[in-house]
Image (tube, helix red, strand yellow):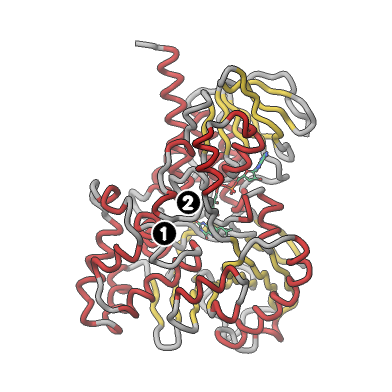
């Protein structure tokens, strides 16, 4: 694509992930001249899809949350006019947790979900109700109460039964890669409410429909979208952003630059470590990314009896020791991890199965990918889908290296920074204090993760820039 060398914009956004797209739509809607530059040939980041062997697969994310009445995603999509362009359905149940002794589903009707917990844990019946009600209607002081604690602290406030706490935490280990004792209470509460209590929404036709709709809306609002357009540098003079330099050397100017890319790339490569305050540099270097994933893509010859309900995410754990599972992630030891997530797609007979996995180098995955893929399929057949292997007509996998290659997310991290209490809501990751005009959006900001989280952050950053511009035009 030709790059707009020498052009001037009000804002340049680097990266057309969901957050960059939402931010771009709001800025263009607010009357700003916006360029959105994406390195990949399609928009969406982790929300893209691809075709292989005659099947269409969601590359990573497959559903989102916060779409209940007044949910954050619902409000923003409605506000941007995206709702009208997409057919969005909810999986019901959205998730089912299966262990050797329990099977608990998360239904659209929350009373039905509570009933399932009551059947197994009658003595905790009231506590489950109170916990869900707190998660779906947090009072304004709840953030500060959860700011420093862990998800374990939060569970301990509500429940006595350790098995129940494990069952509530197991899906979060699969999602966020952290056991309850390490995960921030706030992140755990968000993941729980947006993925389990109000999750399972998906665009009909697959996840790519969502970024496509946002990209169309962005262009309709006057924004300029450039695909296959990697940004090499953010130009800064006198501690003020001046624009961006394209990979081919061209330059476009803007007083505001928003980076939707991973924070390490933003600060260490695009900006350059010399531009960063020492204290922040040390903080950045000490931060831990969230865990990555190994994803299996299977194309089947049709639906058959042992497949689960299409759309529902199955979280399967073959034991109850989440600390053991957590430790095994770093060793890429699938057997010791003893669990995985998978779902059967709605419209085409495909299965996506996901397990947390460490980054490791290219040659590690080159040597181990096939064996990892085949033993994952063996486990799926053994524990969840009897007869699976004879129905597979296409199989492949994405490793943490693949996730990094397509999105440039540091170490293939699935959710930006790891969701620990010390890595939550740090303001320099949203608007660094040492460079004027630079903002970050998306799941590396420490302010939101998952699709609903990054939609919220994209909206928030756009409002900050629009306010700033109003103050410049009307200084009083
Ligand atoms: C396997 C997996 C499953 C997941 N499942 C779900 C799910 O079901 N539901 C859910 O809510 N969340 C899920 N998530 C998390 C969710 O997808 C992410 O949190 C969210 O999509 C991140 O959006 P983002 O806009 O912050 O960034 P990204 O999606 O990472 O987008 C960043 C964009 O920036 C571009 N970019 C990077 N560097 C440059 C550069 N130099 N120049 C130009 N462009 C650049 C990238 O190509 C990319 O398009 C999943 C994640 C993974 C990995």
Question: Does 182 sit above or below residue 408?
Answer: below
Determine the secondary structure under disc 2: loop
Q: Nearer the viewer, residue 330 or 2?
A: 330
- Mark 2 to mark 1: distance in Å? 8 Å
Please identify the quadrant where the N terminus is shown: top right
Taking the spot 50% from the left edge, 78% from the top edge, the residue there is 316
Name the mark on residue 161: none
Q: Which residue is mark 2?
A: 449
Question: Does 187 sit above or below residue 35?
Answer: below
Residue 222: name its quadrant. Answer: top right
Q: Nearer the viewer, residue 425 or 49?
A: 425
The answer to whether marks 2 and 1 mark residues whose Cβ atoms lie closer than 8 Å is yes
Percent across and percent down for residue 459 are: 45, 37
In the image: residue 325, left or right of residue 298: left
In the image: residue 388, left or right of residue 125: right
The residue carrying pointer 2 sits among few (fewer than 14), some (14 to 19) or many (20 or more) residues within 10 Å by Cα, namely: many
């Amino acid at each position: 694509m030709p790059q707009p060398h020498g052009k001037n914009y009000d804002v340049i956004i680097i990266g057309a992930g969901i957050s960059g797209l939402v931010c771009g739509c709001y800025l263009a809607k607010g009357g700003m001249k916006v360029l959105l530059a994406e390195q990949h040939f399609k928009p969406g980041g982790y929300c893209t899809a691809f075709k292989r062997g005659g099947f269409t697969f969601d590359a990573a994310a497959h559903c989102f949350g916060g779409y209940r009445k007044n949910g954050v995603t619902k409000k923003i999509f409605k506000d941007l006019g995206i709702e009208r362009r997409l057919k969005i359905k909810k999986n019901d149940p959205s998730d089912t947790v299966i262990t050797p002794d329990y099977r608990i589903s998360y239904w659209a009707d929350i009373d039905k979900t509570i009933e399932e917990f009551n059947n197994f844990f009658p003595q905790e019946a009231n506590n489950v109700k109170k916990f869900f009600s707190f998660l779906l209607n947090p009072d304004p002081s709840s953030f500060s109460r959860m700011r420093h604690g862990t998800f374990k602290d939060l569970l301990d406030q509500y429940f006595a039964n350790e098995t129940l706490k494990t069952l509530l935490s197991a899906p979060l280990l699969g999602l966020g890669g952290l056991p309850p004792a390490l995960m921030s209470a706030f992140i755990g509460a968000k993941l729980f409410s947006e993925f389990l209590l109000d999750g399972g929404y998906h665009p009909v036709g697959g996840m790519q429909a969502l970024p496509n709709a946002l990209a169309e809306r962005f262009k309709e609002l006057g924004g300029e979208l450039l695909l296959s357009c990697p940004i090499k540098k953010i130009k800064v003079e006198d501690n003020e952003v001046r624009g961006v330099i394209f990979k081919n050397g061209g330059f476009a100017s803007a007083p505001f630059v928003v980076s939707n890319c991973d924070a390490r790339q933003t600060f260490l490569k695009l900006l350059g470590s010399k531009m960063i305050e020492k204290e922040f540099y040390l903080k950045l270097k000490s931060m831990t990314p969230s865990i990555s994933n190994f994803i299996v893509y299977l194309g089947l010859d049709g639906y058959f009896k042992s497949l689960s309900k299409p759309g529902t995410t199955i979280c399967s754990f073959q034991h109850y020791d989440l600390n053991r599972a957590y430790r095994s992630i770093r060793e890429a030891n699938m057997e010791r991890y003893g669990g995985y997530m998978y779902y059967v797609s709605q419209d085409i007979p495909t299965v996506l199965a996901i397990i947390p996995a460490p980054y490791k180098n290219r040659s590690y995955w080159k040597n181990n990918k096939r064996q990892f893929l085949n033993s994952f399929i063996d486990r799926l057949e053994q524990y969840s889908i009897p007869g699976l292997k004879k129905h597979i007509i296409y199989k492949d996998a994405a490793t943490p290296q693949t996730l990094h290659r397509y999105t440039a997310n540091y170490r293939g991290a699935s959710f930006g920074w790891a969701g620990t209490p010390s890595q939550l809501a740090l303001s320099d990751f949203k608007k660094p204090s040492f460079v004027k005009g630079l903002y970050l959006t998306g799941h590396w900001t420490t302010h939101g993760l998952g699709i609903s989280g990054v939609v919220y952050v994209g909206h928030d950053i756009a409002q900050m820039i629009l306010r700033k511009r109003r103050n410049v035009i009307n200084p009083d």
